[in-house]
Image: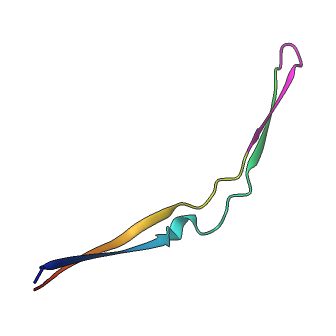
Amino acid sequence: MEERTTVEKRTTVVSDPADTVESPGSTNVNIDTDTGATTVQTNEPVRPQTTIRDTTVEKRTTP
């Protein structure tokens, strides 16, 4: 009879608690005091990050 090996991998992925609230983004307006030139910079919202908290590998060999 043939020996069989089974490998099972479980990974838990969760949101990082510090990143659960999505940033609304921002807008910066810069005015040059010498020339009066205006620069507007818009920053996109930051998306929440995920973190791998736990990885379990289970290996079983059956005859």
Q: Position of residue 61 (x, y in %)?
A: 14, 81
- Look at the picture and state if 54 lies above or below 37: below
Q: Position of residue 22 (x, y in %)?
A: 67, 63
Quadrant of the drawing holding the C terminus: bottom left
Give the left or right position of residue 41, taking residue 1 as reference.
right
Q: Residue at x 51, y 71 (%)?
A: 17
Q: Residue furthest front?
A: 1
Figure check: 20 above or below 27: below
Query: Who is closer to the viewer here, 55 or 22?
Result: 55
> Relative to 36, is 10 on the left or the right?
left
Q: Is residue 41 left or right of residue 38?
A: left
Q: Identify the image quadrant of residue 12.
A: bottom left
Q: Magenta segment: does it hold 5?
A: no
Residue drawn at point x = 12 percent, y = 79 percent: 3
Seen at 56% across and 64% down, the residue is 19
Q: Which residues are magenta?
A: 33-43
